[in-house]
Image: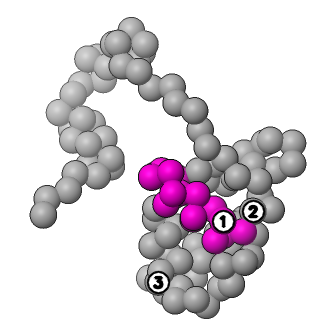
Amino acid sequence: VNLISRSSIVNFISQHVSPQEMNETLDEAGLPYRKNVMSVPDTATAFETFDLIDAKGLYGVAVVDEDGKLVACTSARDIKHAAMDRGGTDMDTDIFTYLTFVRQKATTDG
C-alpha cells in the first residue's frame, strides 16, 4: 500500500517549485480552500471528540473555549497517541486536558 501524506506533498512542492512560482494566492490560482471547520468545546470529552472525528470522517477538529476562541486542534495523530496510551488516560477527561496528557506522554516515550 502506498500513501501520500499532506506533509509529503508540501515537502515535494517546496523542493520542486521556486518561491517566484508561488506568487499567486489560492484564490488567484483558482484553488478552493475555505471549508467549514468543525469544532468542539474544550469541555467535550476525548471520547466525544474522537467519536465526532470518526462519525464525520474528519481529519481533525478545532477545540474552542466558551468564547469560541481556538485553544487547540485535534487530529488523527491524536487518535494514534490515544491508541498508544492504551487507556492510561481516561477518555472521559475533557479533550483539552486529555490532549495535554497524551501528547506529553508521546513526546517523553519517544
Which residue is at 14% across, 59% downward? 2
Q: In terms of sequence position, does the residue under pointer 3 or pointer 1 come before the other?
A: 1
What secondary structure characterizes most of the magenta part? helix
Q: Looking at the rendering, which quadrant does residue 69 occupy?
A: top right
Specify start and end residues of the magenta stretch as a single range.
45-60
| Residue 6 visible in the snapshot | yes
- Identify the secondary structure beneath mark 2: loop
Mark pair 1, 2: CA separation = 6 Å
Return the x and y of residue 82 as percentages of the image width and height. Answer: 53, 77
Residue identified by numbered label 3? 84
Residue pictured at 77% horizontal, 58% vertical: 42
Q: Amino acid at mark 1?
A: Glu
Q: Residue furthest top?
A: 28
Please identify the quadrant where the C terminus is shown: bottom left
Location of residue 6 in the rendering, given as x and y in whole percent from the top left corner? 32, 47
Where does label 2 land, which residue? 44
As drawn, 99 above or below 57? below
Find the residue positioned furthest to the left. 1
Q: Position of residue 13 (x, y in %)?
A: 24, 35
| Secondary structure of the residue carrying numbered label 1 | helix
Real-space Cα separation, disc 3 to disc 2, in angstroms: 21 Å
Amino acid type at image mark 3: Met
* Residue 48 disc label: 1
Residue 107 seen from this side: no
What is the x, y in percent for residue 108?
A: 54, 83
Query: As shown in the figure, which amino acid type bears the numbered disc 2?
Result: Ala
Q: Is residue 1 left or right of residue 92?
A: left
Asked whether disc 1 touches disc 2, contact meaning CB atoms under 8 Å apart, the reply is yes
Up the image or down, 5 lies above or below 28; here it is: below
